[in-house]
Amino acid sequence: LLLMFSFSACNIGDEAKGFFEDASIVLNEYDKLPDEEWKEVLSIVENEFNTWPGFVMHYIEDVYVGTNTSYCEMLSNGVEFDMCIILKSSFTTGENAWRGFSENITYEDFNWYLARTKDGEWQLVEYGVG
């Protein structure tokens, strides 16, 4: 099942303001998680991304949703997870880029690694190119 919508279509409400609200979101594996979990996952990414001043998100897409959690567990120093999601995104930096980003550049294939702990809590494990 393929689902494509804008972030505002998530019905997350006022927290969908900012540099993330006009992004296109493609969820190829939408049926693998309930709506509430997708909202939580996307909100985690959106909350982190909105701390990057001047950056504009263009799209975000799931590239993996499943129970092979070994990579996420390695990134988190052995925390055990029961589900892992890898999202791919494209965004443009602002004039005051930071965190090692170049100014006014569009980054493609920027990955976000999220994992769900055994108690059902989603967390951002890592992000970056590659």
Image (spheres, grey):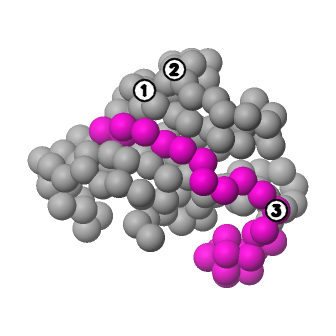
> What element does badge 2 sit on?
helix
Residue at 61% across / 18% down in the picture?
A: 11
Magenta residues, start to end: 56-80
Side (left or right) of 91 relative to 128: left
Q: Which mark is residue 67?
A: 3
The answer to whether the residues at label 1 and label 3 have Cβ atoms under 8 Å apart is no
Instruction: Name the spot of residue 124 as percent of width and height, x first.
Output: 59, 57
In the rendered image, the residue lying farthest to the front is: 1
- Residue 91 visible here: yes
- Identified by mark 3, the residue type is Thr
**Which residue is under mark 1?**
21
Q: Let me know if residue 118 is in the magenta part.
A: no
Q: Earlier in the sequence, mark 3 or mark 2?
A: 2
> What element does badge 1 sit on?
loop
- Identified by mark 1, the residue type is Glu
**Which residue is under mark 2?**
8
- Identified by mark 2, the residue type is Ser
Image height of 36 relative to 90, above or below: above
